[in-house]
Amino acid sequence: MSSRRTFLRQLGGAVALGTLATTAGCTVPPWIQAGASGSGFETRETALSRDTFDDYVARMADRYGDGGVWGLGDEPDDADTTFVGAWTRQLTTGDGHDDGTGTLILADFAVVCHRLGPRDDADGQRHRYWLWAAAAPTASPTADIPFGRRSVTPELRTLGVGVAFSDDSIRATSPDRPVTTPGVVDLAAVSSGSDGLVGRFPLATGTVQPEASVTWDGDDGETDTEGDDAGTDTDGYAVEWTGRHRGSQSLNAVCLTVRPADADPETVSFTMGSRLAAVGYL
């Protein structure tokens, strides 16, 4: 298993369990705990165009409100910043019936890359990767529920997004510490401090936990905490929300990377991972 896949394994794994019971001659809808995950290798060729991405941002703002791609702010518009590309995903949990019923949670994910400033001949090209995830419960009438009642609102349990690089080295991330206080999360305030780590998003409840800049041993996939025998082919960053929430929740994070001075500054490649878990009646 590659180090890149090993890093994103923390965002992997899917579970779908349910039981069906009967009460007083009626069929009781099953209580489901379900998860979904995905990962894929991305390049500039797989990115959305600027116009397509702008349309996507507008749709996500309609769907999630303040929990859209840019959270409570606007797209960073720093001097000498160039939009490189954006990559998106969507996951659902539940049975996924063809008629659209049987879905507990719908979640959307995006990674947005900007090139920062002129290339430094000594240090290499800098990039900023903006990570976003948002999820909302779905509540559709389900035939399995007696008398056509609407299902109980599903409960979001896990929401995560991450990136892993084989060429770039991560220099700074935000958040770089757990966030547990509900309210507005200010990315500039939950980082050790670096230019470009800005953004705000609403946290209704739960905990935001970062997994920053770790390298896995290329042989067995285990984390080398000492660093003596660590592989050097992957640097990664993931952030995950966990909790119990029956409403929508979004998540933002940002990481700054540097590409080696001898690498092509126009090339972008990374692995994007996403994860979702929920419980509820179907």
Image (cartoon, rainbow, N blue to C red):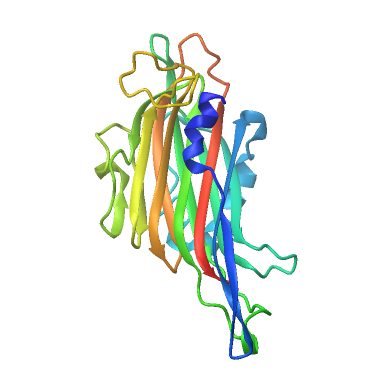
Residue shown at 38% from the left, 59% from the top: 243
Res 63 seen here = yes
Instruction: Estimate the x, y position of residue 22 in percent, counting from the top left.
Output: 60, 82
Task: Please count the marks in the image.
Answer: 0
Residue 189 or 271: which is nearer the viewer?
A: 271
**Looking at the figure, which quarter contains the N terminus?**
top right
Please identify the quarter of the rendering in which residue 270 is found: top right
Residue 193 or residue 19, whichever sits in front: 19
Q: Quadrant of the C terminus?
A: bottom right
Q: Is residue 69 something one can see in this rendering?
A: no
Percent position of residue 251, x then y: 42, 51
Residue 152 image point, x, y percent: 51, 77
Please name the residue shown 46% across and 35% down the image.
129
The answer to which of 68 and 215 lies nearer the viewer is 215
**202 or 154: nearer the viewer:** 154
Q: Could you tell whether 275 is left or right of 97 in the image? A: left
On screen, residue 87 versus residue 201, left or right, reads right
State which quadrant residue 178 falls in: top left
Residue 186 lies, with reference to residue 100, above or below; the image says above
Residue at x-position 46% and y-position 42% = 131
Q: Quick check: 237 above or below 264?
A: below
